[in-house]
Amino acid sequence: MLLSNRQKLILRTLIKEYVKSAQPVASGILVEKYKLDISPATVRNELINLEENAYIHQPHTSAGRVPTEAAYLLDLEESNLRKKDLKSLDKEILDRAFESSIDHSLKPVARALAELSSNAVFWAFHKNDLYHTGLSNLFAQPEFKQSEIVCDVSQVIDRMEEIIDELFDSLAEESRAYIGSNNPFGSFLGVTLLKYRRQGVSGLVGILGPIRMNYAHNLSLLTYLQEKLK
């Protein structure tokens, strides 16, 4: 289904609210909080259309709606067309992290990425020297509060070096996102990755979080990082 500009706006706004709140989004919130110049009845009808075409779903009867994997993929494609530059404050934080890096260690930069993304960050220096930080950010996410999910996430962390080894050589030197079912780190996760080459050595940095992730912001962070690593 090709979405109209109005449907894209409603879907983009719903994703934005869900990423912030982690709560199903009701039509009233979209109209009132985001001041959409669309009548409540029209928003409700468009949400029904989006649900019928599998871009959103209703987790509980009479609850609001949440985006599906297809919605995130579409929004990511759309956001690539309307790329926004990273905020000045984010750039300053990353710049300071680079300045504080000693003996070419980029661990302060990884910690800054975890802070700015509110997700976990892993960094494979020279492919076989793995560092990760921000795991508390990951386990603080509402999706990962249940014990069985915590176990699943922990298994991914335990296997991270193995997953990176399998993935590393197939990646181009660029930033990209993997969402849900196409994510090698787990179908219940989202990840943005940057493979880079610095001083003749390749490395890989990733921002790992729930599928409900701000992909556009995280990719902007990695794009800026890529420039700094040249």
Image (cartoon, rainbow, N blue to C red):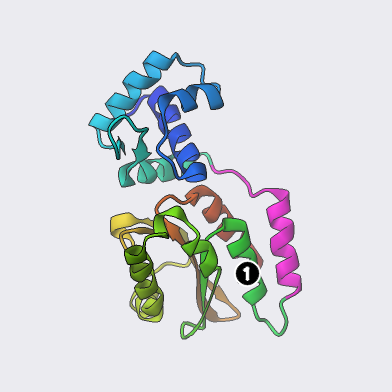
Q: Which residue is found at the position 44% from the left and 13% from the top?
A: 39
Residue 161, percent from left and from top: 40, 80
Compared with 188, 58 (above or below) is above
Compared with 222, 198 (above or below) is below
Mark 1 lies on a secondary structure that is helix
Q: Is residue 107 left or right of residue 11?
A: right
Mark yes or no: residue 230 visible.
no
Give the main secondary structure, helix, strand or loop, of the magenta stretch: helix
Q: Is residue 146 left or right of residue 13?
A: left
Q: Is residue 112 left or right of residue 30?
A: right
Residue 43, percent from left and from top: 39, 20
Q: Which residue is mark 1?
A: 111
Compared with 5, 227 (above or below) is below
Give the residues drawn in magenta, as a range: 83-100
Quadrant where the C terminus sits is bottom right
Under mark 1, the amino acid is Arg
